[in-house]
Image: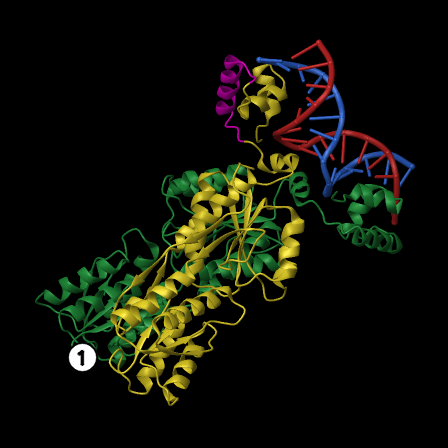
Chain colours: A yellow, B green, C red, D blue
Amino acid sequence: MVPTIKEIATKAKVSIATVSRALNNDPRVAEETRKKILDISKQLNYSPNILARNFVKKKSNIIGMILPEISDEFFTEVIKGVDEVTYEKGYYTNVASSHKYESLEDEIITFIRNGLFSGLIILLSDLKPKLEAVLLESHIPVVLINSNTKIKNFDTIAIDNYEGSYEMTKYLIKRKNYSKLCHITGPVKNDDSFLRKKGFIDACEEYGVTYSIEQGDFTKESGYKGCKKQLRSKNKSQVIFAANDMMAIGCYDFAKESGLKIPDDIGIVGFDDIFVAQYLTPPLTTIRVHIEEIGKNAADILIRRIKKEIMPARLSIKASSELIIRESC
Amino acid sequence: MVPTIKEIATKAKVSIATVSRALNNDPRVAEETRKKILDISKQLNYSPNILARNFVKKKSNIIGMILPEISDEFFTEVIKGVDEVTYEKGYYTNVASSHKYESLEDEIITFIRNGLFSGLIILLSDLKPKLEAVLLESHIPVVLINSNTKIKNFDTIAIDNYEGSYEMTKYLIKRKNYSKLCHITGPVKNDDSFLRKKGFIDACEEYGVTYSIEQGDFTKESGYKGCKKQLRSKNKSQVIFAANDMMAIGCYDFAKESGLKIPDDIGIVGFDDIFVAQYLTPPLTTIRVHIEEIGKNAADILIRRIKKEIMPARLSIKASSELIIRESC
DNA sequence: CTGTTAGCGCTTTCAG
DNA sequence: CTGAAAGCGCTAACAG
């Protein structure tokens, strides 16, 4: 039989209220009483019934985390970061992918209505008005992992997309002396894509070089296609900056297939620094994002919101990125 | 104000018990009454308070998943598999890494005592007696993702280690005509390592070839060292079978460094088929394990245990593996 | 088929 | 500082 505060109360000859107070570090309990209660509960090997506590407090110690359907190493890292801080602070981390059979909005509605989560961390490629409305209505703390600077109503943790992309482009132009560059973008309606593209374009225009844009969607295949299209056009670029490493891999595939040497015939760079990047031949020059930071920050902010700590109305944090120079350009 | 069954009861002019029954599909409710209740609850936009329900039922709809501290793509896949089936069945998936500051046993004890989880999926490299005792004592359903065939008290989902390793070794000997092979093992006290090693040895002995063993620990560095040691010994092998791809990468590193051509000077194969395997130069021959199956099976079995469905006392399922032939041997 | 009632374990007024 | 008591929303006997 699992011990309850009632038993402790009996043994300690006090009321359950006092036990509850002692256990919750309520200051208005005599030191002596507290000590006795703590002793007994230790002796009884007591641990509070979280289910009961959550119920009466009308809130859980569980944080929900909603990931996009696709899985990749990015998410493991984020989860790890989140888990590390939640665990430390006595919260649990619940993960769910957005599932194919439901729209993200519906799924999140289900989540919220269930009342199981006291806060939500959502990885989002873009925030649609409907979802925003749902979230706002819910009145539970939400942290978004997303890079759109226009988000006004939520705390956001973002990747340093623009800066990273700008840095990379500048590096290609100033250090590597490329004057004809091409950028293969991520999907339309994706805030990361948008900013990476913008960083690229701004740098190109600032330094007055020729550039072109191919539309991609973050998949390897789209990288392959973009590369193909670009290299067969009459205005061939000297270097391709893919908006993520996966598309850069697609470019490698095409280059290899057409007997083009990297970086001599064509330079290729990416963004993300996924694990495989360093093992490509040649190793890929790319931008590394400090992912675990993202998870940690998200969890930290969320928990502080849950605890209603005093803090600015809306936080917007950027995880730093770093140029990783290897041999692909 | 969030509606409760009480409100529904008032509006429907029935008791809360009837509402509860109707909502829980209890057959002893008149069709007409049920319809009325369902209508009203829809109209009120009612959704049950999970916290209350869990509390009164003394069990949650949450499954805990405990992962090793290290993170890699394996886990994302497993999580995905688990989440897919739990979500479908109305359960939530809680993930936690084993945290550095606590022993795995203590952490699991905390988890269990909290009473938040109605079942546990644990990824384990080996099952220590202390942990086994803790788990047994808890009386909550547990599914282990581990390959030790000697585990008697829990359902287990395993990787097809022995068979995969045996297959690979046989392939090296019979198809590739290697007669001097080397195996770099994973860590001692790791059930996967043990079985992979055993599969290798058994095949070598069965076909009467010369073989040697180097001790590794699944890290890239240990693969590098093992390869170095092996290739500098007087009894050089013709091919190295690393117990995982990461160590195979270490071997590649050493081979490249010493100017050895793969596969002409030395063959190298791995186990796991991690994403990068296909992008190594040359692409790595390895064993692919169907990871998502593992997660799905684990969740499926666990939920059936939670629901106390009738099923065999102890299930032991193996995820299948598959030889992926590329160009590294 | 439906209603009444007890109670889950805990927190939190309200009194004292 | 401590106790009594109410009540969170729901389920599950039990009675009818």
Front residue of this view, candidates A130 and B255:
A130
Front residue of this view, candidates A238 and A211:
A211
* Vertical position of residue B14 compared to residue B196: above or below: above
| Amino acid type of the residue that numbered disc 1 sits on in the rendered structure | Asp
Please provide percent x and percent y for residue A178: 29, 76
Please provide percent x and percent y for residue A1: 58, 31
Residue depicted at 28% across the width and 87% down the height: A259
Whether residue B152 appears in this view of the structure is no
Q: Quadrant of the N terminus of chain B?
A: top right
Examine the residues drawn in magenta and state their main secondary structure: helix
Span of residues in magenta: A28-47
Whether residue B166 appears in this view of the structure is yes
The count of marks equals 1
Front residue of this view, candidates A234 and B298:
A234
For mark 1, what is the residue? B264
Residue B278: say if magenta.
no
* Vertical position of residue A45 compared to residue A234: above or below: above
Q: Secondary structure at mark 1?
A: loop
Corner quadrant of residue B186: bottom left
Please provide percent x and percent y for residue A305: 54, 41
